Amino acid sequence: MKILKSVRLRNRLLVAPAVLGLALTAACSNSSSSDGHQGATATLTGDCAKYQPYAGHAGTKVTMFASILSPESDSLQKSWSDFSTCTGIKISYEGSNDFESQLPVRVAGGNAPDLAIIPQPGLLAQMVKTGKVVKPPAQTVDNENKWSPVWKTYGSVNGTFYAAPMSANMKSLVWYSPKAFQQAGYQVPKTWADLMALSDKIAKAGGSKPWCGGISSGTATGWPATDWLEEVVLGGQGGDVYDKWVNHTVKFSDPPISAAMHTVADWMQNPAWVNAGIGDVKSIATTTFQDAGAPILTNKCWMLQQASFYEAQWPKTTKVAPDGDVFAFQLPAVNPAVANPVEGGGEFVAAFSSRPEVQAVQNYLSTADWASSRIKVATGWVSANQGVDKSLYTDPIDQLSAAALTDPAATFRFDASDMMPAAVGAGQEWKSLTAWFAEGQSIQRVAADIDAAWPQ
Amino acid sequence: MSTQTSSVTVPLPAVKAVRRSFSSPLGSLFVVVVTVLWTLPTFGLLATSLRHQQDVADSGWWNVFTHPELVLSNYHTVLFEGGFGVSGGLMPYLVNSLAISVPATVFPLVLASMAAYALAWVRFRGSDTLFFVIFALQVVPLQMALIPLLQLFSGGAHLGSFTVLPSFDLAGTYLPVWLAHTMFALPLAIFLLHNFISQLPRDLMEAAVVDGASHFRIFRSIVLPLCAPALASFAIFQFLWVWNDLLVALTFAGGTPDVAPMTVRLAQLSGSFGGRWELLTAGAFLSIIIPLIVFFSLQRYFVRGLLAGSVKG
């Protein structure tokens, strides 16, 4: 009885702040919406003058939803803090690692964010199908022309341009230790044949195996293996076959892709070549991609194929430079006839609202000005915008990536698994390639399983 | 009161048998082994949260026994730096978690106890059918109701051009989370409490009616005090469920520091590439503290309430 009284009393005490909190939030939302109409176009001066085109929306708020988390998201927020202060547009950023599943739920539930930063063209297409994505304003379309034309197609759905690219990352890199290479007298290979010859030489020299790798990544286990296959398809078969593969006119079981899978098997499933410093071929499936490169630092592994963002995984004390502890070279084309194949990824800014302040933010994010501002905040971020001054990049990996991504002669293609339907690119392909490494499933079976999962 | 305590304290034969088998040496050994096995992951969590980032990446937590190099820096980072230089750390999220969990426990408790009393003791046409329908609602999976509920909160409900419910501008407040948790909790809460309340002796109610007590008076003075153990055990259930929930919070509250609870922040702590385990474990350990306080302070009602609700019902 006594306990119950105190429970009851506690209930009463708790309801009061709850009601108060409600009243407060209601008051806040009212004030912010009325502020929005006050802003007559003010003239911005001094340091703010360059933000004049975006002025006139002081006191408004734009919500943004993305998959980018701290510390990368902190750098993003810093990069537009001047813009926010000058224009008075508050950007309310929200990052989630459940972005891919939450965005469709929120859009279907009528609770879409104003702007979403979408890393997969496949997800963008899915969002456009809901009819909620708003076409970008004219200025964004104009800014977009500063990018190489192929990027525009990745931000488009059925030929209509919807989302401007924001950042780009480079996947076709091989991490190695320049110090160890120098000591052993090895040269950075320029062609695929050189790379294979070097691997063979290291394996025969004894001591350590040439390659290490890891494809474990929680519920996304298998994605690094899709990158290996994509790079071999792009570098061995060229852009046309790659595009047809993405839209399934060339199937996984067709000869070009089967051939590529055999090349991957000779490379990353070669028992004499992997898994350096970790274990056998099967250990690739159980090693997390974050830990895969660790043996390079202890000289137990020579090379790791992984994207430019792997730079964040090295310990802080590691020197990443052409003469440092680790560095990367571009993965050479399997077929020398394919001109500079570059596989990459990136993010696209899609809008779910056409309010003027949302369009102002959208315009700003598509400019080279913003990209420069982001580059100055922190390293590990590259824009494929050709208008960006390349001397701004201070990090050698960023410089390498930026050069490859903005090279007009390069055969650039977006990560295929991000463009394929989610059931394949973020589902069966991960599963089957993992089984390929973990259980040694045959190439025919892996290819047939993935083809069978393709939505009709 | 006397009837209720007697029914609980008289041990059933089955209970006696279980108690005897647990107090045998073999049984005790079994219990100890199971306890150690079950506590091991939590201990691993604690050990990981006290190790250096580099050690966590290099080797398993059991290496603390051979290389006991423990630091508190992970806790400092999580609590005061929010991971990577975000001000405030975990504190705003802790407050959000409390602001979500407490009302989302109290609301269903109040509503369900009233509904359970009405369904058990107020005679009206169709009360059994109504109870059955509410009971049956438990089969609706939470995940299936997420999008329709979100649509209801953001767009209101319309029949053709007729507005049944206007759209409340609730985005970015706690209210949608409270409402969602309350809705999903009600069927089970009503079912549990109904079983308990309907077993109260009829004589008590009749005596109260003879004395001229209204339904509300009976509910307040007789039913509520008597079902305290059931209320407490359901409160623990609901509190732990809401505290640990990620899906509902992520969908209805979002991930901004204004409303997001601890669970959402924990999911973000490991970073874009999932590499910061040492921060995740420190944050996870901090998030255990409050549920532990709730559990231990209400623990003695927990087993009693569960037994009372199930065995009698």
Image (spheres, coloured by chain):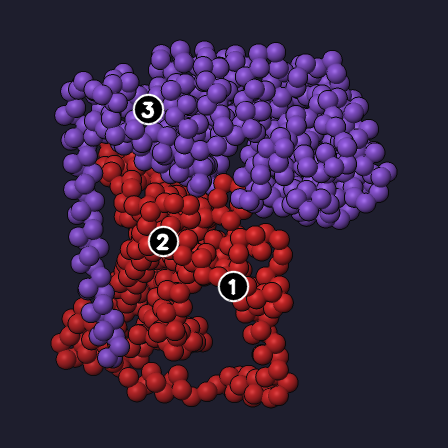
Chain colours: A purple, B red
Amino acid on which the number 3 mark rests in the picture: Val
Answer whether residue B207 is visible to the viewer in this image. Answer: yes
Q: Are marks 1 and 2 on the same chain?
A: yes
Of residue A340 and residue B283, the one placed in the foreground of this image is: A340
The residue tagged 2 is B80
Amino acid on which the number 2 mark rests in the picture: Phe
Expressed as whole percent of the image width and height from the top left, the position of residue A87 reads 24, 25
For label 3, the crowd category at 10 Å Cα-Cα, with few meaning under 14, some 14 to 19 and many 20 or more, is many
Expressed as whole percent of the image width and height from the top left, the position of residue B287 reads 41, 59
Image mark 3: chain: A
The total number of labels drawn is: 3
Answer whether residue A158 is visible to the viewer in this image. Answer: no
The residue tagged 3 is A361
- In the picture, the disc for residue B70 is 1
Residue drawn 68% across the image and 42% down it: A296
C-alpha distance separating marks 1 and 2: 19 Å
Expressed as whole percent of the image width and height from the top left, the position of residue A352 reads 36, 26
